[in-house]
Image (spheres, helix red, strand yellow):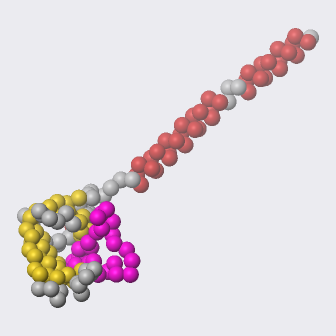
Amino acid sequence: MKKLIYFALTAVAFSACNNPSQQKVETTESISSVDTTTSSTTAVDTVHTSQNSLDWAGTYEATIPCADCPGIKTSLQLNNDGTFVLQSEYLERKNKFEEKGNFAWINHGSTIQLQGKENKTQYKVGENKLIQLDMEGKEITGEHADLYTLHKK
């Protein structure tokens, strides 16, 4: 009789161990749903970019802050063929500079980088404006951040 009770308890214990296969299936299903959600949120919209959605070609102007002068009057002409002309005039100094070169689209078509001899400046391209970026390719922040925006003429 003791053997029969022992056998019955052992059978119950083994039957309780069969439930992990159901848990494994549920875990796999929940992981699949998480993976699907994650991949859909990281997708980049390559169809609509500044490069192909905006009328970006043209001339942009601003007076950029300067550490030791009242400002740098800046004019940047972007051409459809991927070339640029950058004119800079240091106010109250009569120093004028002009640089020509090519520009490249980076960051999935939202930013341009000038490819001149001296200049590797990056600009985020917006609707009728260019926002000059810092040396790390990030938007300039702070009290005078809006002064780094060139507006289309």
Name of the residue lying farthest toward the right: 1
Q: Which percent across, then down, holds residue 88? A: 14, 78
State the residue in front, 139 or 2. Answer: 139
User: Residue at 24% across / 68% down in the picture?
Assistant: 123
User: Residue at 9% across / 64% down in the picture?
Assistant: 101
Tally of marks: 0
Residue range highlighted in magenta: 127-153
The vertical placement of 80 against 106, above or below, is below
Q: Is residue 79 visible?
A: no
Is 15 on the left-hand or right-hand side of 58?
right
Q: Is residue 25 magenta?
A: no
Name of the residue lying farthest toward the bottom: 92
Q: Which percent across, then down, holds residue 153? A: 15, 83
Q: Which percent across, then down, holds residue 137? A: 30, 63
State the residue in front, 153 or 133. Answer: 133
State the residue in front, 29 or 72. Answer: 72
Q: Is residue 95 visible?
A: yes
Q: Which percent across, then down, holds residue 48? A: 26, 62
The image quadrant where one finds the N terminus is: top right
User: Residue at 17% across / 82% down in the picture?
Assistant: 90
Is 99 on the left-hand or right-hand side of 105?
left
Q: Quadrant of residue 82?
A: bottom left
The vertical placement of 56 against 3, above or below, is below
Q: Quadrant of residue 63?
A: bottom left
User: Residue at 57% across / 34% down in the picture?
Assistant: 25
